Amino acid sequence: MTGTDTDLAKQILDLLSTPPSGREALFALANKIRRENMGDSVFLRGIVEFSNVCSNRCLYCGIRAPNVKVNRYRMADDEILAVARRMSDWKHSTIVLQSGEADSPAENRRIGELVRRIKAETPLAVTLSVGNRSRDVYAFWRECGMDRYLLRFETSDPKLFAELHPDCSLKDRLQCLEDLRAVGAQVGSGFLIGAPGETLETLANNILLCRTLDLDMIGVGPFIPHPDTPLAGRPNAYKDDTDMFFVAVSVLRIFNPQAHIPATTAFDAVFSERDGRDLVLRRGANVFMPNDTPQRYRGDYLLYPDKPCVDEDTGDCSQCVLGRLDLLGRPVGEGPGHTVKKRS
């Protein structure tokens, strides 16, 4: 780290160490910074989990390749397009196409052509989240109309990354983020909160890395291991103080004032009795990502257990979120919700 990075890491660590008695003030500060930089609007970005086929063996993920209990699927392109065409009616401005990592020339070509069709047939912005690829593939997808890409680095600790992700390195992941920026995509990344082996210093460095990468969107969520994985039963590092999950989001907002930060689904899984995503929206977030995957696939796309809304169908989640936003007094964002950052 440079001297400046060391100073910032200490500032971040100090805020992460805020005692419970001071957290409401921290949450209020993050909310104020969010309002001043991003406004009150909440952008709706509908997720379509179009395939759970994955070649990776991440130690905590339910769709990891060695998990033979998973019923594998790939949605047909026309089925995905049918969902995309309805999203504007649900006040969504972005479709997020998410899948396991299945890198092949045929799949890469298929994804590109799918993006091209969505851009031709709908007004939606398109975000892809399908894992590590080469710069040439990212460039092809960008030419097809891809607006954004989400690829979480998960942890800034190279050793911990290697333990959790045996199929690639942190260096590889960061190179992908650099390649995405080079081809002109808006770049999203983020991290797990409380992975086994994480320290508070690691968490501070995760937030610092987000700032250093100058990300357009930052998605974070609690570590929740799937029961059919090698990390089944391993506790979250903050199991005895789960409000640290909200502290992390608020500190993330304070040090990344102009990034889009979504209230991710995992917060509802952990805080089901407290409407976790609502609390995240009150503590720094400005994006909500309804699940628009057809119901018949949802039970087969379980990255972690107790995922909410599995029994709902396409569009149901959208109606629910509109009600939640109304109770929060937050309007739905209009337009594509692109990055607000100005770069030369």
Image (cartoon, rainbow, N blue to C red):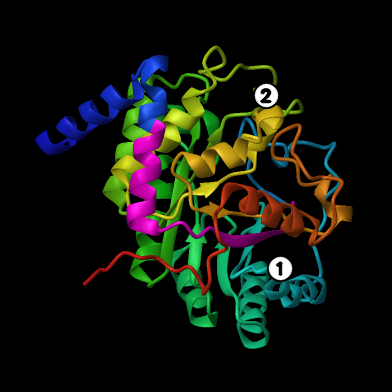
Give the magenta range: 27-52
- Residue 307 position, x and y percent, is 74, 38
Instruction: Report helix, strand or loop for mark 2.
Output: loop
- What residue does disc 2 label? 230
Residue 306, quarter of the rendered image: top right
Check contact, mark 1 vs mark 2: CB within 8 A. no
| Numbered circle sitting on residue 90 | 1
Quadrant where the N terminus is found in the figure: top left
- Residue 259 position, x and y percent, is 38, 54
Instruction: Report helix, strand or loop for mark 1.
Output: helix
- Residue drawn where x is 50% and y is 62% of the image: 149
> Position of 232 compared to 3: left or right?
right
Q: In this picture, is 84 found above or below 75?
A: below
What is the total number of numbered labels drawn onto the structure image?
Answer: 2
Residue 273 can be seen in this image: yes
Callout in the foreground (1, 2): 1
Please name whichever residue, 106 or 220, is drawn nearer the observer in this view of the structure: 220
Sequence-wise, the earlier of marks 1 and 2 is 1
Q: In this picture, is 29 found above or below 235?
A: below
Classify mark 2: residues with Cα within 10 Å, few (<14), some (14-19) or many (20+): some
Badge 2 amino acid:
Pro
Farthest residue in the bottom direction? 120
- Residue drawn where x is 62% and y is 30% of the image: 59
- Residue 322 position, x and y percent, is 68, 57
> Position of 124 compared to 245: left or right?
right
> Position of 339 compared to 219: left or right?
left
- Residue 168 position, x and y percent, is 49, 43
Quadrant where the C terminus is found in the figure: bottom left
Residue 166 can be seen in this image: no
